Image: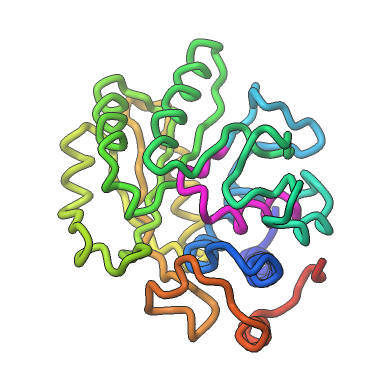
C-alpha cells in the first residue's frame, strides 16, 4: 500500500506524461487531464481492485473505471501504462496514426484497460449503470467508478441516467464530477449554469459528497469512505473540486488550456514545474 507521498510522486509523473503526450501530438486536452491526475493516481494505485496481468474486458470480480469525459484520456493512458497495462513507451504514440492511444478511448484498437469507447459526452454514466446492474445480476460485489466533466452535465442523457440510478438503488456505483467550473468555451456559469448540483442529485435519490480533487490526502481518504458506503441502498456521487491545468502555473485559472497543446517553449516550462519520479518514456 503506497504512502501518500508516493502517490503524490506518481501523480507528478502522470502530469509529466500528460504534457509530453499532448505536446508530442500537438493535439489533445491538457487542462482537465492535469486536474484529474490525482484522482487517476489514487484510483489505479490505491483504491480499485484491478490487475493489469489478468485484464478482462468484462471485469469479472474486479472494480472498473469508465472515463465518460473521454477527452482527458492522457490522464487515463498514463495511469494504465504506469500500472503495466501496456508499455510506458507506447505513450509516445498518443494521437498518432494507427496508435492504440486514440484521442478518446476506443475499443477497436483493443488497448488493455479500455472497456468501452467514450468521449461522446453524456453517455458514460448510462453505460456505468448498465455495468453495475450486470455485476449485481452476476453476484459480483465489485464497484464501478465513472468520471464525468461538469460541462458534460449539460447533456440531457446524464439526468435520465441519474434519475434511473436513484430510482433503482444502483448502490455499487460511484460517480464523480470533475467540478473545475470550466469548459471549452469559458466558465460553466457563463455557458450554462448548473445550479445546485448537490440538491439536484439528492433530489434524484443519490448520496452526494464533495472533496478537493487536488489534495491527495483528501482524495484517498474520501474515496475509501465512499467505497465503504456502497452496497447500502444508494448510488454515490462525489462532486470533485479541481483546478483545470493543476500543477502548471500558467495553465491554471483559465479555460484556455482545455484543448490547446503547449508549444516547445511552453512544454519545457511546464515540465520544469513537475518532478520526474518514475522516469520519462
Q: Residue at x 27, y 28 (%)?
A: 166
Residue 145 drawn above or below residue 75 = above
- Side of 45 where 196 appears, left or right: left
Q: Within the image, what quadrant is residue 155 found in?
A: top left
Q: Residue at x 20, y 57 (%)?
A: 192
| Residue 41 in sight in this render | no
Quarter of the picture holding the C terminus: bottom right
| Residue 66 drawn in magenta | yes
| Residue 280 drawn in magenta | no
In the image, the segment drawn in magenta is 65-82
Which residue occupies the foreground of this view, 37 or 46?
A: 37
Q: Residue at x 32, y 54 (%)?
A: 151
- Side of 64 where 214 appears, left or right: left
Residue 133 drawn above or below residue 84 = above
Q: Residue at x 84, y 59 (%)?
A: 89
Protein image colouring: rainbow
Q: Position of residue 68 (x, y in %)?
A: 46, 43
Q: Position of residue 88 (x, y in %)?
A: 81, 57
Q: Within the image, what quadrant is residue 123 found in?
A: top left
Which residue occupies the foreground of this view, 6 or 244?
A: 244
Main SS, magenta residues: helix
Q: Position of residue 127 (x, y in %)?
A: 45, 28
Residue 221 drawn above or below residue 66 = below
| Residue 19 in sight in this render | yes
Which residue occupies the foreground of this view, 24 or 231?
A: 24
Q: Position of residue 91 (x, y in %)?
A: 75, 58
- Side of 256 where 27 appears, left or right: right
Q: Within the image, what quadrant is residue 194 found in?
A: bottom left
Number of numbered markers: 0
Amino acid at each position: 500500500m503506497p504512502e501518500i507521498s508516493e502517490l503524490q510522486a506518481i501523480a507528478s509523473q502522470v502530469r509529466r506524461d500528460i504534457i509530453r503526450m499532448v505536446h508530442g501530438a500537438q493535439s489533445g486536452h491538457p487542462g482537465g487531464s492535469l486536474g484529474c491526475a490525482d484522482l487517476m493516481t489514487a484510483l489505479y494505485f490505491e483504491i480499485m481492485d484491478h490487475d493489469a496481468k489478468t485484464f478482462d474486458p468484462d471485469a469479472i470480480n474486479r472494480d472498473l473505471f469508465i472515463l465518460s469525459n473521454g477527452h482527458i484520456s492522457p490522464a487515463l493512458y498514463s495511469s494504465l501504462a504506469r500500472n503495466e497495462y501496456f508499455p510506458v513507451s507506447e505513450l509516445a504514440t498518443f494521437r498518432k496514426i494507427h496508435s492504440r492511444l486514440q484521442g478518446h478511448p476506443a475499443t477497436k484498437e483493443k488497448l488493455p484497460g479500455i472497456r468501452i469507447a467514450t468521449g461522446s459526452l453524456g453517455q458514460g454514466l448510462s453505460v456505468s449503470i448498465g455495468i453495475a446492474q450486470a455485476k449485481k445480476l452476476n453476484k459480483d460485489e465489485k464497484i464501478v467508478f465513472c468520471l464525468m466533466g461538469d460541462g458534460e452535465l449539460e447533456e440531457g442523457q446524464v439526468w435520465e441516467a441519474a434519475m434511473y440510478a436513484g430510482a433503482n438503488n444502483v448502490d455499487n456505483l460511484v460517480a464523480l464530477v470533475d467540478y473545475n467550473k470550466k469548459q471549452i468555451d469559458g466558465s460553466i456559469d457563463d455557458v450554462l449554469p448548473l445550479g445546485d448540483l448537490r440538491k439536484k442529485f439528492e433530489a434524484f435519490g443519490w448520496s452526494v459528497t464533495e472533496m478537493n480533487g487536488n489534495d491527495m490526502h483528501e482524495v484517498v481518504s474520501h474515496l475509501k469512505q465512499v467505497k465503504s458506503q456502497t452496497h447500502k441502498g444508494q448510488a454515490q456521487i462525489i462532486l470533485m473540486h479541481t483546478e483545470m491545468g493543476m500543477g502548471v502555473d500558467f495553465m491554471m485559472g483559465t479555460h484556455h488550456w482545455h484543448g490547446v497543446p503547449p508549444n516547445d517553449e511552453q512544454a519545457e516550462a511546464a515540465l520544469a514545474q513537475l518532478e520526474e519520479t518514475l522516469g520519462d518514456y
